Amino acid sequence: MQGIWTTERIRAAEDRLLAVTPDGELMRRAAFGLSVHAAEMLAEHTGSVSGRRVTLLIGSGNNGGDALWAGAFLRRRNVAVSAILLKPERAHGPGLAALKRSGGKVVSIKDSPQWIRRADLVVDGIVGISARGPLRPDAAALLEYVSSPVLAVDLPSGVDPDTGAVEGPAVAADRTVTFGALKPVHALAPASCGEIALVDIGLRPELGEPDLRRLDTADVAAAWPTPGPDDDKYSQGVVGVAAGSATYPGAAVLAAGAAVRATSGLVRYAGHAADVVRGHWPEVIATGSVTDAGRVQAWVVGPGIGTGNEGRDVLRFVLGRGVPVCADADATTIIARSPDVLDARDPDTPLVLTPHAGEFERLMGSPPGADRVAAARSAARKYDAVVLLKGHCTVVAAPDGRALVNTPRGSWLATAGSGDVLSGLVGALLAAGLDPWLAAGAAAHVHSLAGALAAGGVPTSASGILGAVPDALRSLRSPAS
Ligand SMILES: NC(=O)C1=CN([C@@H]2O[C@H](COP(=O)(O)OP(=O)(O)OC[C@H]3O[C@@H](n4cnc5c(N)ncnc54)[C@H](O)[C@@H]3O)[C@@H](O)[C@H]2O)[C@@H](O)CC1
Ligand SMILES: [K+]
């Protein structure tokens, strides 16, 4: 699992490390790593390093200091380095002196457009972890002239370091080189960060437990159920799917299909789309009502069941079975409108809620806002449930405060029916006995992987995502292929 730390925790760890490190040492470690990446980008984009032009955008903090020192290192490789100082009187002193000693040039704001336009690489050292609010106008104005590849120092300026929110002009980096540890921005604003590289400056021992996590392929591969020689269809977990309607059977077909493809356990279906589900998935045991569905180890309830009395009865029934429940789509709306349905729930049985922003607002009375991790955590506490907050980056929070982010590859999941597939995956993992937080996180990971495989650079559909689930699972076990 990758750890992610808030800027407050990073700063505290840096202070501890600074106290036992010679003056300027940490910045030089950071800046040297940065200069290596800058040279690599120059070589990638232009075919050479020596003689190329790099322009540094320099704010008034240590982020600018990193960039200035990196500029001095690049001079050793005969790179023409120019620095635009947003506040010359407050630029990092030792960094600026080092750049000047090395033969780097300081450019006035007035001349900055041409130096930005002519650069082979622009280095964003405007703000780092102490950034507050939207980018100030003088800094924002510089971004208009950028057309070459951009390397962001620590994080792309203009993006909130702790929430990844972008409220105004912001750097869109091709690569972000960060120091010591990942910060929330790196998981929550993938499009602004570009490729992310982590430079080790010796901070890890000072950091303690992460605030936020990201599952990597190996975690998901290890968590995903694999049957052993003694397993049978029951021992791997029977999942029940209560979804769809006679008029709208699609949600049922997708959710049940995802459950079929996720694990080799048994899938039961209960609802008005039983014939259609059976037609698509002959392996599913389908029946008309949850009351005669038979025993399951987890329920998926909600997609397409409607928000009327019948849907409410179905939800109340499954919540009262004493097994984990993934409540999705219409079930979330029912819970928001009639919270008393939750009285049917045994408080010791896990509940996973999977709201998108609109459903979240119904559940919580206000939209998730800029801090989606905090929003998911507060909903998890309120409902004593794992909350999977859908969005470009999916956040999964548990009532005990654990939170993870799933950073997607592209935006291909935003298609009708995609959520039904996700809920089927979550349900199958719950039935297999996974910790519900991990189940939701692993399902989100495989869902986005399947979306990327299905899309392959062009639009896909929920059926396409469902069809790519086996390939996504295969790729977990051989990530290089
Ligand atoms: N503390 C350390 O030991 C290390 C810090 N490092 C670097 O230091 C950075 C943090 O440095 P600082 O704490 O000095 O602060 P920053 O460089 O992040 O920014 C602070 C400055 O930016 C200005 N600013 C804040 N919000 C702004 C906005 N919205 N628009 C324009 N200007 C804004 C502030 O007035 C302040 O002068 C890290 O991101 C990292 O790049 C690295 O060198 C590694 C070691
Ligand atoms: K920056």
Image (cartoon, rainbow, N blue to C red):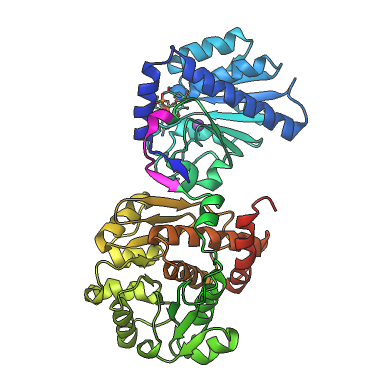
User: Residue at (50%, 35%) from the top-left corner?
Assistant: 155
Q: Looking at the image, which residue sits at the far front?
A: 230
Q: Position of residue 164 (x, y in %)?
A: 44, 45
Task: Describe residue 153's horizontal placement relative to residue 454 as left or right.
Answer: left
**Quarter occupied by residue 81:** top right
Q: Quadrant of residue 347?
A: bottom left
Give 169 or 247, whichever is nearer the viewer.
247
Q: What residue do we see at 68% from left, 26% from top?
A: 39
Q: Residue at x 53, y 81 (%)?
A: 253
Q: Is residue 210 above or below residue 469?
A: above
Q: Is residue 50 magenta?
A: no
| x then y, percent, for residue 276 | 54, 89
Seen from this angle, which residue lies furthest top?
Answer: 101
Residue beneath the point at 54% across and 41% down: 193
Q: Which contiguous range is marked in magenta?
A: 205-213
Residue 374 visible to an observer of this rendering: yes
Q: Position of residue 390 (x, y in %)?
A: 44, 61
Q: Nearer the viewer, residue 179 or 325?
A: 325
Above or below residue 322? Residue 18 is: above
Give the left or right position of residue 45, taking residue 167 as reference. right
